Amino acid sequence: MGVQENVQKPLDRLSEALGADMAAVNALIRDRMTSEHAPRIPEVTAHLIEAGGKRLRPMLTLAAARIMGYEGPYHIHLAATVEFIHTATLLHDDVVDESRQRRGRPTANLLWDNKSSVLVGDYLFARSFQLMVEPGNLRTLEILSNAAATIAEGEVLQLTAAQDLRTDEAVYLKVVRGKTAALFSAATEVGGVIAHADPEQVQALFDYGDALGISFQIVDDLLDYGGATETIGKNVGDDFRERKLTLPVIKAVARATPEERAFWSRVIESGDQREGDLERALSILSRHGAMQAARADALGWSAKAKAALTGLPPHPIRDMLSDMADFMVSRVA
């Protein structure tokens, strides 16, 4: 049984349980990504949205609403909002990172150009705000608009922190809570809010999304140094080539000898990367047990996510979310 097949199981079960809702979300997304005057908008958007993404974030919104017994129509709008925000950030991220591959396919900025990716991302952000207004719930509007600002803030923080060897795990966590976990926690939180859940239950949903998002990002960092290209949808070593100080490297830098620190300074801070440097980086990570230590952190956050769910009503979908937290970390051995 392959790693990816293993990972897909809880997602597949969740997708099946939320099938009708996800079909409605996908229909709404397709409807709102159209443009009468700019045909490039649906071209670029469809390339990314139809690329086989797992739709994990909108599913979290639908799951939260269902666990809390919501029977209205607006969880669909909120889930579509979450996916639009996510897609907009991906378009912008690929320009910032000069990425060439996303979900195993060429990035939009490679197929079209940076201008198209930035402007279509802007369009999707605008569409997301139109969608989040429609439920008429000021609290969900506040949560999602705050998340959009937090994501941008996290990305800007990463610009300066990612290539600075002084960046420690506390700063890393701020970056991750911004650029990744903020949308996970907003996705789960708004599902509870639209269902009029108790404040304690809304907090539990937020806590689950926050911990799941942090675990997700740590695992993504680990896969960059040890996952198959087919599994991670990007090239192994992309973070290294983009000079990103991710958690395994931060842990290795904290334990580095003077010679190793000079190496990290050259390849990350100065960007002077040579043949064989990725292999040397992997050797240093292995020597200090940095990958195992980062995986232990991911397991810790996964356990926090599962613990948060105990504050929610018993429900088959709640059990699927618990399985999701386990399988998230199973992507790395």
Image (cartoon, grey):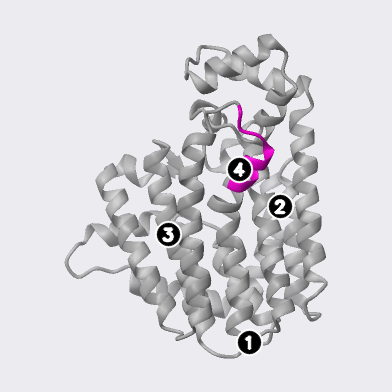
Q: Position of residue 137 (x, y in %)?
A: 49, 84
Q: Residue furthest left?
A: 37
Q: Which residue is mark 4?
A: 231
Callout 2: helix, strand or loop? helix
Which badge, 2 or 4, comes first in the chain's sequence?
Answer: 4
Q: CA distance from mark 2 to mark 4?
A: 13 Å
For the residues bearing labels 1 and 4, Cβ distance under 8 angstroms:
no
Mark 3: few, some, or many residues within 10 Å (few <14, many ≥20)? many
Q: Is residue 51 left or right of residue 130?
A: right
Q: Which residues are magenta?
A: 166-174
For the C terminus, which image quadrant? top right
| Towards the viewer: 123 or 317 | 123
What SS does tag 4 mark? helix
* Residue farthest toward the top in the current orientation of the protein: 259
Dot 3 amino acid type:
Ile
Category of crowding for the residue at label 4, using alpha-carbon neighbours closer than 10 angstroms: few (below 14), some (14–19), many (at least 20) = some
Residue named by callout 2: 328
Q: Earlier in the sequence, mark 1 or mark 2?
A: 1
